Amino acid sequence: MLRNLIDEVRSRRVLAFAALGVLVALALPLLFLKSAPEGAPDANTAAPAAAEQAKLPERAARLLATSDAGAAGGRAKGSAQDPFSPPAAYRAAIESPTANGSAGPAPAGGGGSAPAAAGSVPASSAAAQKAANEQAGGGSKGLSSPVPAVSTSPAATTGTPSDSSTSSRKPARSLNAANAAVDIRYGPKRDTRIRRAIPRQKAFYIHGKLVAVFVKYSPTRKAAVFAVAPGLHVTGDVKCRVINGACRYVDLPAGAHAWLTMVTANRTIVSRRLDVVHIKRRTAGGRTRATSASSRSEAACLARKLVAMERGDALLGRNACKN
């Protein structure tokens, strides 16, 4: 039977799979065996005996058993002197009654002992330091006397800003109707020439007919205000104020535009684009266009007549206010 099984495996060419199955069957019991970790003490093994106290060398035993006063104080005799031990004079000064806090000689001219000044060094400490310097450096060439520490208050070093710097800062003037300069474009297409700082009551025409007037800059609306004729068709990114069913005022902030469209007498549709390019504060040295008194009077007359127009009125011409 085993012979037939082996012949069957060889004929089907699954000998490798059969060998792999045998290896897995042998390896599975080994995986479940829990072996003890290396180095773990055995319960049956006795604990190791405590190590015997090591014997010190003869010279070390003599050093521990010595009762020399110099050794107790941190100094050895001969060439075995401890470099970190303080000098004998310094220890004597520290152990003296003066160093322990007793009152020193009274100051001259005073009835009692005055409190020591902040940062000063006591006389006993100064004497001990001098003795240590002489022994370590050989006289007056030793270490210098300690410098008294001086503490400063943080409030003393903190400065306050000067009044001149704060007084020199002037608040920036905000835009208003008097100091605002409005730059515009006006024409049949988008990119026409820029008209700088147009004056108030500036008139705009289409084919000789008055269609709009620049009123002023409004700081509350943050826009240039234009009065328009009631029979005009206004489009664009504008905010139009309607009075009696007609658009009478247009508010244009900087960067906005409006298309003003009218129908002529021969039924032709004509449009003009009004752009507000910049709105900025007029500089003190900026040039203003000089106009005559008659021109200003004529512009004011046209603005008044345009504002007084009603819906259905004919558009005004250029000569509406000329005598």
Image: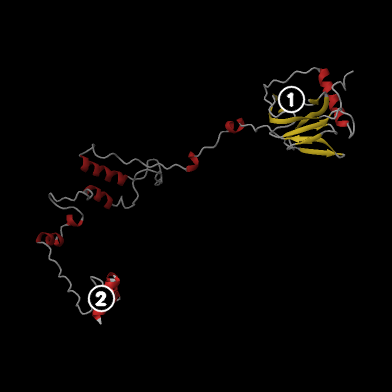
Vertical position of residue 170 compared to residue 136: above or below? above
The residue to which callout 2 is attached is: 7
Q: Label 1, secondary structure: give it.
A: loop
Quadrant of the drawing holding the N terminus = bottom left
Disc 2 to disc 1, C-alpha distance: 111 Å
Rendering coords of residue 212 (x, y %): 80, 29
* Mark 2: few/some/many CA within 10 Å (<14, 14-19, 20+): few
Q: How is the image coloured?
A: secondary structure
Q: Is residue 146 left or right of residue 283?
A: left
Disc 1 marks a residue whose amino acid type is Ile
Rendering coords of residue 176 (x, y %): 73, 32
Q: Label 2, secondary structure: give it.
A: helix
Between residues 163 and 193, which one lies in front from this camera angle?
193
Q: Is residue 283 left or right of residue 84?
A: right
Q: Is residue 278 left or right of residue 11?
A: right
Disc 2 marks a residue whose amino acid type is Asp
Between residues 85 and 271, which one lies in front from this camera angle?
271
Vertical position of residue 155 compared to residue 297: above or below? below
Between residues 323 and 17, which one lies in front from this camera angle?
17
* Mark 1: few/some/many CA within 10 Å (<14, 14-19, 20+): some
The residue to which callout 1 is attached is: 198
Q: Is residue 63 left or right of residue 242?
A: left
